[in-house]
Amino acid sequence: MLLLAGLLHVFQLGAQSLQSRYVESYPVAASKKGLQVELIDDALVLGVKHAALNFNLTPLVDLAGDTNNPTWESDGRIYRFQRSQLAAMDERIQSLSEQGVIVNLVLLAYQSGDAARDRMVIHPRCVTNAPNRLGAFNTVTDEGRHWFAATMEFCAERWSRPDRKFGRVAGYIMGNEVNSHWWWANMGRVTMPEFAEDYLRVMRLAHDAIRRQSSWARVYLSLEHHWNLRYGAGDEQQAFAGRPFLDYFTRRAREDGDFDWHIAFHPYPENLFEPRFWNDRTATTNVLTTPRITFKNIELLPAYLRRTELLFNGQPRRIILSEQGFQTPKGTDGELIQAAAYCFAYKKIEKLDGIDAFILHRHVDHPNEGGLLLGLRNFTPNVTDARPKKKSWEVFRDADTPEWQKAFEFALPVIGLASWDDAR
């Protein structure tokens, strides 16, 4: 409930105090059903309760000082941000949040080819032509650090306003799958402690900047499903196992003054081309030494976060599943198998304490995703706006409605369950 527009609220965080411009409670959703939204109107028809939107920070900064662009003052300096970039994001955020959807932004830094802009936003150690053109954030140089903090303040104020003029954002995910940083948050070849120290600085700066504006918006670190082993395509300076990375991050955050961070996790099946996660061999149950955490053993993650050393103010960190999906296998039963995997995963997550959202990837198949067909809708090449629905579209729509049992019934024999009471 909104207490008072503009009311300042003091948070005790370790040795420091932060005052929030706007004070509200974190919103409560009717269910955990979420989607990485591409088609706004379709997402609303599907009844999404959570959404994730990618937000590239690189084109947002205005280094030229165009007086027609919005401004923000931070530490006595004026910063400007590109109006066109904001307008496009405002429209998407507002369209969703005004319908009660909890919106999370995945903050990214794509290499643009503009040397001055990239130098300001992207980590100076990021390699030229990084995989997927994604770099870590630049909080190393004085200029980069100030721009980053000002950007976070500006965004948090804009999307936390009591009048909701530009829509409402409840969560900020800092980068993507950072334990495999070489591909998704590149800062060159580094050791795990080197990357963790840099990322901790990013997370702390983001948290403090956002909390100065919003008392409720959460900051999330992003991890993929490799838990006790690293992604095999890279070496030890390109990818790290999630568990030791998380443990190191937690310890160092506590040593320097703990703060309110949370986890955005991606429990894809062990083989992204095989949706039947219940057969995953490297996702062992009831064992924290498991190589991977997938939907098969996802309950291990909230259990792990209940460990004393990971608590914040006596409470576990919150979890959102911000990106994961299921391949549509080739063959006549491909859509059936994909849809069954979603049914099983949804029923597991629905009853797990500590996980607030299950945000599916993708909305529509992507032609350049390495052959993966993860969408609720097909992509038809050379046909404008042709996005035929799959079986998974129907079960997603009904997942949190009174029709769920009828819609999900087909999946039980596909999975090998007698009833949904056995979904664990």
Image (cartoon, rainbow, N blue to C red):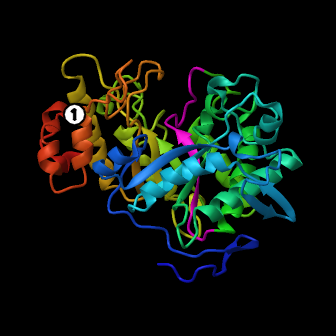
Q: Which quarter of the picture shows residue 386?
A: top left
Q: Position of residue 117 (x, y in %)?
A: 79, 38
Q: What residue sits 73% from the left and 53% below the top?
A: 69
Q: Which residue is mark 1?
A: 391
With 373 as the anchor, is 176 left or right in this view?
Answer: right
Q: What residue sits 26% from the left and 41% below the top?
A: 344
Q: Which is nearer the eye, 30 or 89? A: 89
Q: What residue sits 36% from the left and 56% below the top?
A: 49
Q: Which residues are magenta?
A: 214-233
Q: Is residue 270 magenta?
A: no
Can residue 296 be seen in this snapshot?
Answer: yes
Q: Which is nearer the eye, 411 or 234? A: 411
Q: What residue sits 20% from the left and 29% below the top?
A: 336
Q: Position of residue 180 (x, y in %)?
A: 61, 32
Q: Position of residue 403 (x, y in %)?
A: 15, 52
Q: Which quarter of the picture shows residue 57?
A: top right
Relative to 188, does residue 76 appear above or below in the rendering?
below
Amino acid at dot 1? Lys
